[in-house]
């Protein structure tokens, strides 16, 4: 990461002065809420292939922050992903119902906002 201009920021996070984004190397196994991530998206670059969360798992990740910490910015991020990327809403709903309270109730906030924004 140093060779690319990144510096270690906090623990497993790396920052670069030229971008507002950070890179995180989470401890395994990778989880979204209480569910392990089993598939990944792949993004090909001139430097190789980067593995990423699928759009569906990215929505789950952002919703987990909304469910567990009432993080409204994470809700907005989940909505933005769902509006601009193909996601499996049925899978997200099933996942939300298995997460601890208040996940199922807060999922309804997400679903309602998404329906209103798609009209």
Image (cartoon, rainbow, N blue to C red):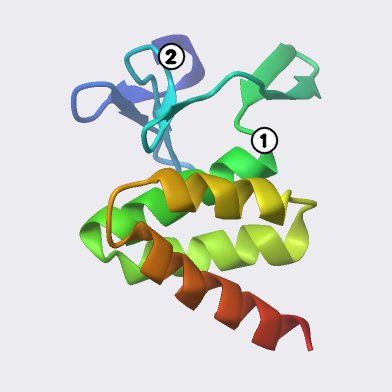
State the SS at label 1.
Answer: loop
* 15 versus 26 height, above or below: below
Mark 2 packing: few (<14 Cα in 10 Å), some, or many (20+)?
few
Q: In front here: 16 or 21?
A: 21
| Depth order, front residue of 29/76 | 29
Dot in front, 1 or 2: 1
Seen in the picture, residue 93 relative to 9 is either above or below; the reply is below
Residue in the image at 75% along x and 22% along y = 42
Above or below, 61 against 37 in this view is: below
Q: How far from the left and from the top, in percent, is residue 91?
A: 65, 45
Name the residue that disc number 2 marks. 1
Q: Quadrant of residue 83?
A: bottom right
Give the residue drawn at x 69%, y 56%.
89
What residue would you read off at disc 1? 54
Residue 35 placement (x, y as % from top left): 45, 30
* Picture quarter with the N terminus: top left
Q: Quick one: SS at disc 2?
A: loop
Q: In which quarter of the image is the C terminus?
A: bottom right
Cα separation between marks 1 and 2: 23 Å
Residue 113 at least partly seen? yes
Q: Residues within 10 Å of mark 1 (few under 14, many from 20)?
A: some
Side of 92 relative to 42 (left or right): left
Residue 56 image offset from top left, x and y in percent: 65, 44
Q: Number of labelled discs?
A: 2
Residue 75 placed where, x, y %? 44, 66
């Amino acid at each position: 990461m140093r060779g690319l201009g990144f510096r270690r920021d906090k623990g497993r996070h790396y920052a670069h002065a030229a971008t507002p984004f950070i890179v995180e190397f989470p401890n395994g196994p990778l989880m979204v809420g209480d569910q392990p991530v089993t598939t990944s998206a792949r993004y090909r670059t001139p430097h190789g292939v980067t593995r990423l969360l699928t759009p569906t798992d990215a929505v789950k990740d952002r919703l987990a922050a909304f469910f567990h910490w009432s993080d409204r910015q994470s809700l907005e991020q989940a909505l933005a992903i769902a509006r601009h990327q193909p996601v499996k809403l049925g899978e997200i709903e099933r996942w939300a119902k298995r997460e601890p309270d208040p996940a199922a109730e807060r999922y309804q906030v997400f679903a309602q906002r998404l329906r209103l924004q798609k009209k």
